[in-house]
Amino acid sequence: MAEFAPARELLRQFKGDRYLHGLGVLPATGAATARLGRRAALVCDRFPGSEPYVAELQRSLRQAGVDLVGEVAGAAPNAPREDLARITAQLATLAPEVVVAFGGGSTLDAVKAAGVLNALGGSIEGYFGVGLVSKAVAARAAQLGPFVAVQTAASSGAHLTKYANITDIHTGQKKLIVDEAIVPVQPVFDYEVTRGAPASLTADGALDGVSHALEVMYDACGKPSYDLIERVAGEAISLVIEYLPRAMEDPEDTEAREGLGLATDLGGYSIMLGGTNGAHLTSFSLVDILSHGRACAIMNPYYTVLFAPAVERPLRLVGRLLARSGYLDGDVNALAGRELGLAVARALIAFERRIGNPATLDEVPGFTAEHIERALAAAKNPQLRMKLENMPVKLTADTVDQYMRPVLEAARTGELDGIINVG
C-alpha cells in the first residue's frame, strides 16, 4: 500500500535485500536457511493459532533440503535465566549447523544468548554490558553460529538488533547484552503471523516499538545522526498511533497488522541507530508486575517531562503526530521547554488511556514502594550504565536519587508537577 512505502524504503536502507518481511514471506525461510547450513535446530514458540505457521516453516525447510535435527521449546516472557540454561544445553546436545527460532522477542533473545554461551563458554553474567561478546570472540578467535530469527510478534525488533534481555526472575531484575556480534544473520518477519494476536500482546508490542523510537530520538537530539533517526522513529510512532487502535478493535485487520509490523521493525532500526534510556531502564525493574512494552509506555510520559528542555525538536514532532489524531489540543510550536514536555506527556497518557493501558504505577496490581527502590538501585548498576549515558540530560549514579526518584514518584501517582528538571 502506498502509505507503507516510506517505511518499506527505510527498512530496505537498513537491511538491504536480505531481510525477509511482509505478508506471506514465511515460505522463503527454507531457502534462506539452506544458504547457512543443512542441519538445523528449531527453537519454537507454540501458541494459539501458531500451528499452520510452524507447519509452513517446517515444510519450507524440508523443501530446501534442510534437515531438522530437533525442536527446542522457546523461552517464557522476559527470557528467564532458567530458560536460557535449558535452551543452551539442548542446542549444545543437538549441535546444529544453523539455529532457526520461531518466536517473540523473549525466545529470540534467549537464543542469541545461548549462541554466545555455546560458542564462548562462561557465565552469562560476564557478557552483560556493551561489546563484551565481541571482545571475547576476538580474544578466543571464536565464531558465533548462524542464527535465522523468525519473528512472531510486532514488538521488540529482536530479529533485527544487537540486544538480548535476560531476566533473573528471583530478583525481578532484567539485564542486557548489547553487541553487534549477536545480530541475527537472517531475519524473517511474516506480518501475517500476528493476525489475530490478542489485544494485550498487540498493545504491549506496539508500545515497545513506540518506546524504542521515542527514547532514541531523545538520545539523538543535537547529534549529527538526528535527521535520519527522526525519519525512522517518526514513521514508527506515526504508524503505531494510526494502526494500534484499529488492530485492537479488529484483530483480523491485515492492513493494521502490516502497519504495526513495519512500525516495530522501524523501532528496531531506531535502536540500532541510537540507545534507549529512562523508560527502558526503569522497565527492567518492573518485570514481575508488567510486560515490557506496557512498563515503558507508563514511564515515558514522566521521563518526557524530565528531559523536556533538552528535547524540544522531537517533542514538537511527536506532539504534532498526537495532535493529528486528537490526543493533544493547541499548537505545540507555541510551547517550549517544560510546558512543551507537559503537553506531550499528557497526550501520551491520553493515547495510553485510549488503548486501555494503565498510565500510573499505582494502577498496576502488585506494585509496591520496593519497585521504586529496586529501579533506583538498578540505575546505579555499572552493567546498566549505558541507559544513564543515553539520557539527553546526563545523570550519574550520584544524581540518580535527586532526579530519578521524583520521576518514579510521579509515575506512581500521575502527578507531573513534582518532576525536577536538571540544571
Image: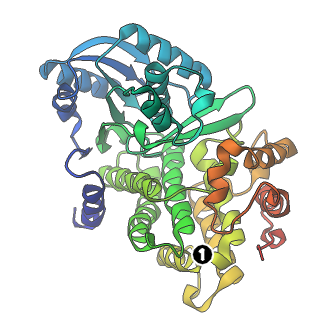
Q: Which quarter of the picture shows residue 419?
A: bottom right
Q: Is residue 352 above or below residue 112?
A: below
Question: In the rendered structure, which amino acid carries the disc numbered 1?
Answer: Val
Position of the N terminus, as image quadrant, is bottom left
x and y percent of residue 54 in the render?
30, 24
Secondary element under disc 1, as helix, strand or loop, is: loop
**Residue 333 % position (x, y):** 55, 89
Give the residue at x 56% y 21%: 122
Tell me if residue 157 comes above or below residue 175 in the rendering: below
Residue bearing mark 1: 311
Q: Residues within 10 Å of mark 1 (few under 14, many from 20)?
A: many
Name which residue lies at 47% across and 54% down: 271
User: Measured from the top left, where is residue 423 in percent x and y?
Assistant: 78, 77
- Residue 226 seen: yes
Q: Position of residue 366 (x, y in %)?
A: 78, 39
In the picture, measured across the screen, residue 275 lies left or right of residue 392, that is left
For this view, does 36 lie left or right of residue 300? left
Q: Is residue 357 visible?
A: no
Compared with 148, 42 (above or below) is: above
